[in-house]
Amino acid sequence: MDVNFGGSANAGIGTVEQLQEQHDTPIPIIFMSDEDGTIETRLRASRCGGEEFFYPAVDPGQLIEKIETYTHGNTVEPYKVLVLDDSRAQAKYMETVLKKAGMTAHIITDPMQIIHALEEFSPEIIILDMYMPGCTGMEIARVIRQQDRFHSVPIIYLSAEEDVTKQLHAMSLGGDDFLTKPIDPKHLIATLHNRGRRARSLLALMIRDSLTGLYNHTHTLHLLEQEIVRARQKQQPLCFAMLDIDYFKKVNDTFGHPIGDRVLRSLSMFLKQRLRKTDHIGRYGGEEFAIILPNTRPGDARNVLNEIRERFSELLQPAGDREFNVTFSCGISSWQDDNAQILCERADRALYTSKEHGRNCVTLAES
Ligand SMILES: [Mg+2]
């Protein structure tokens, strides 16, 4: 909904306010405005069910993603919560409370198991007891924070400690919250939901490239490793493709960087629309993209990417009153029970071959 729908100021919000009155549960609304981003307008929009507010420009890719979260978003994955408490009774009680709330709980009572539990379970939230034999919860929190992968996982202390000074000290060592025992299960679950939701949205920002909304380099490699494990378990084929836009520097030099950025976004949208939901698309570098195609045979991967290459090359890229075409080159490697690094190197070499053969083509790496 355009904030100024109909032409007059805030008329769009007025319309939504009227609509929402007829519904017990408000309809989620995405507002957009190219001229009014003031706090007053944003508040009014948010009060009548405005879940998103795009200002001053709407990015089509982001908009599509938001719409997807509101239309397929009813299946929220349960939060994975790791609980460390030396009291078995307390730990069991927590497990019951968490499971009742639909969360996935993993309980440990021995602090020395923490590293193993982090790796095996990969928790999204961690609940720590303060006092345990052998070490304190604060010490454990510091060890957890020393690992990059768990740097942003919320840590919540749960303890009978009522001394606020001690609580604050514990928080300063990497904790996010301090809850005191005995805790009302309702408060605990509400805290976990808030922390979990926030952590997930931060993580989504951390793993994505801000220009295209695709996965960034690090996360793409992480996904590739996961998919290799899965392919091995399920005995399924797997392909990895690398794409590079041809003569991208010339686009930037001729039309300017904003147009260059738009080309990058148009290719990322194009890929998102034409690949399956199960494929992973990443922005690998400047004008380089990577695609992971699980359960795909090399011949099929080549056909799909060739089709995309052809259609994309026909797309007219607007630049003021001019139009131009852009092509890309592609290299594909298929997984031969090797590791991620070798798979990438083979795709990279195949991409290089495509470039050598005059660009705008797809090369399948030889096995
Ligand atoms: Mg204890």
Image (cartoon, rainbow, N blue to C red):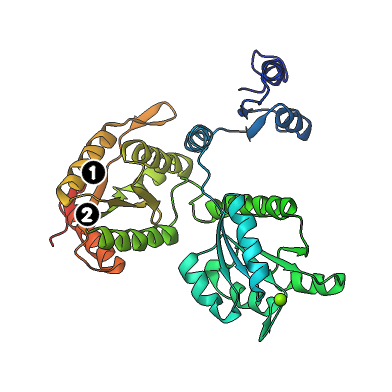
Is the residue marked 2 within 8 Å of ligand 1, measured from its CB? no
Which quadrant of the picture is home to ligand 1?
bottom right
Vertical arrangement, residue 330 with respect to residue 254, above or below: below
For the residue pair 107 and 201, the one nearer the viewer reads as 107
Kindly identify which residue carries mark 1: 305
- Taking the spot 66% from the left edge, 30% from the top edge, the residue there is 50
The secondary element bearing badge 1 is classed as: helix
Residue type at tag 2: Ile
Side of 18 where 336 appears, left or right: left
The answer to whether mark 2 and mark 1 are in CB contact below 8 A is yes
Q: Residue 15: x and y, percent?
A: 68, 16
Q: Quadrant of the C terminus?
A: bottom left
- Taking the spot 32% from the left edge, 63% from the top edge, the residue there is 229
Mark 2 vs mark 1: which is more N-terminal?
Answer: 1
Whether residue 362 is visible: yes
What is the crowding at mark 1: few (fewer than 14 residues within 10 Å), some, or many (at least 20)? many
What is the crowding at mark 2: few (fewer than 14 residues within 10 Å), some, or many (at least 20)? many
Whether residue 154 is visible: no
Q: Residue 53: x and y, percent?
A: 64, 33
Vertical arrangement, residue 77 with respect to residue 174, above or below: above
Q: Residue 315: x and y, percent?
A: 31, 31
Kindly identify which residue carries mark 2: 332
Q: CA distance from mark 2 to mark 1?
A: 9 Å
Q: Determine the image quadrant of residue 178.
A: bottom right
Q: Determine the image quadrant of residue 203.
A: bottom right
For the residue pair 101 and 79, the one nearer the viewer reads as 101
